[in-house]
Amino acid sequence: KDATNDFEDVGHSKAARDMMAKYCIGKIDVSTIPLKRTYVPAKQAPYNPDKTPEFVIKILQFLVPLLILALAVAVRYYTKSS
């Protein structure tokens, strides 16, 4: 990536500009840069509809914690020493 604009925007000191020569990889030939980037859409996963109705999932999200709580209370009640 050409980092010239990023480097210039920060406002580096003279020492940083002197160090730049040590890390400079090379110059970019601007004639090889395309004028307009072609848009390539991101690949999406193939459509795979969920076979489970939405309301069943919502019911399970509500009932499973309640069942766990009921089980914990039952275990506590039956293992409680009188």
Image (tube, grey):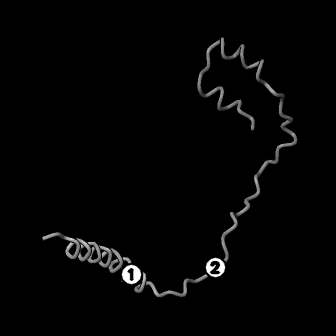
For the point 68% across and 63% down, the residue is 42
**Disc 1 residue type?**
Leu
- Which is more foreground, mark 1 or mark 2? 1
Q: Is residue 59 left or right of residue 81?
A: right
Q: Residues within 10 Å of mark 1 (few under 14, many from 20)?
A: few
**Most foreground residue, 77 or 2:** 77
> Tag 1's secondary structure?
helix
If the image is split into quadrants, where does the C terminus sit? bottom left
Q: Are marks 1 and 2 in contact (CB under 8 Å)?
A: no
Instruction: Name the residue tied to disc 1.
Output: 60
Q: Is residue 82 left or right of residue 62?
A: left
For the view shown, which residue lies furthest in the left direction?
82
What residue is shown with label 2?
47
Tell me the quadrant of the picture where the N terminus can be found. Answer: top right
Real-space Cα separation, disc 1 to disc 2, in angstroms: 24 Å
* Residue 77, position as x, y percentages in the image: 19, 74
Task: Work out whether residue 37 or residue 14 is closer to the camera in this orientation and state it.
Answer: 14
* Residue found farthest to the front: 82
